[in-house]
Image (tube, rainbow, N blue to C red):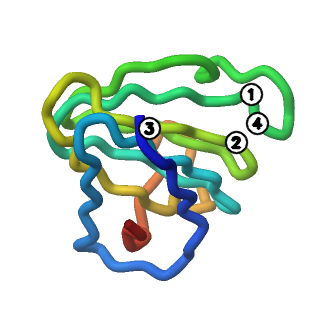
Amino acid sequence: MTASHALNSQQSSDQDRCRLGAGVARSLMPKTAMQLRVLSGRAWVTLNDGPHGWREESGDLLLLAGQSLNVAPGQHAVIEPLGHEALDYQWCRQDAARTAGRPVAVIACDACHA
């Protein structure tokens, strides 16, 4: 694993696509509710418990292309590609307004900082 990077920016664009090469990790520390969406490859994600204690999503997770994970404000996620292929993903803000029985809408994605 090489140096990790922190993404804290709130500048957005709907077309942002982030890429991590094999052996590279990235640290994600959102200030607002965010969603990590895997576009291609496989992601190994390690989540801490966040600012409010234990969460079901905490620990190590494997995300495949097409899968996503919600990350709470103050929660820390470390992502890296699993295997030898690159990982393409989006890191997007979630709409703060939830409607019962409906998924959280993604409203904007943050730019990558490599």
Q: Secondary structure at mark 2?
A: loop
Camera-side mark, 4 or 3: 3
Identify the residue position indicated by label 1 in the image: 49
Q: Residues within 10 Å of mark 4 (few under 14, many from 20)?
A: some
Q: Secondary structure at mark 4?
A: loop
Q: Residue at x 50, y 49 (%)?
A: 4
Identify the residue position indicated by label 4 in the image: 50
Identify the residue position indicated by label 3 in the image: 79
Q: Position of residue 33 (x, y in %)?
A: 61, 54
Marks 2 and 3, how far apart at CA = 13 Å
The mark that comes first in sequence, 1 or 3, is 1
Q: Residues within 10 Å of mark 2 (few under 14, many from 20)?
A: many
Q: Residue at x 17, y 34 (%)?
A: 41
Establish if 103 lies above or below 46: below
Q: Name the residue furthest right.
A: 52
Depth check, front residue: 103 or 35: 35
Depth check, front residue: 54 or 86: 86
The mark that comes first in sequence, 4 or 3, is 4
Q: Position of residue 105 (x, y in %)?
A: 43, 57
Camera-side mark, 1 or 3: 3
Identify the residue position indicated by label 2 in the image: 75
Depth check, front residue: 55 or 59: 59
Left or right relative to 40: residue 76: right
Marks 1 and 3, how far apart at CA = 15 Å
Res. 2 image quadrant? top left
Q: Residue at x 18, y 41 (%)?
A: 86
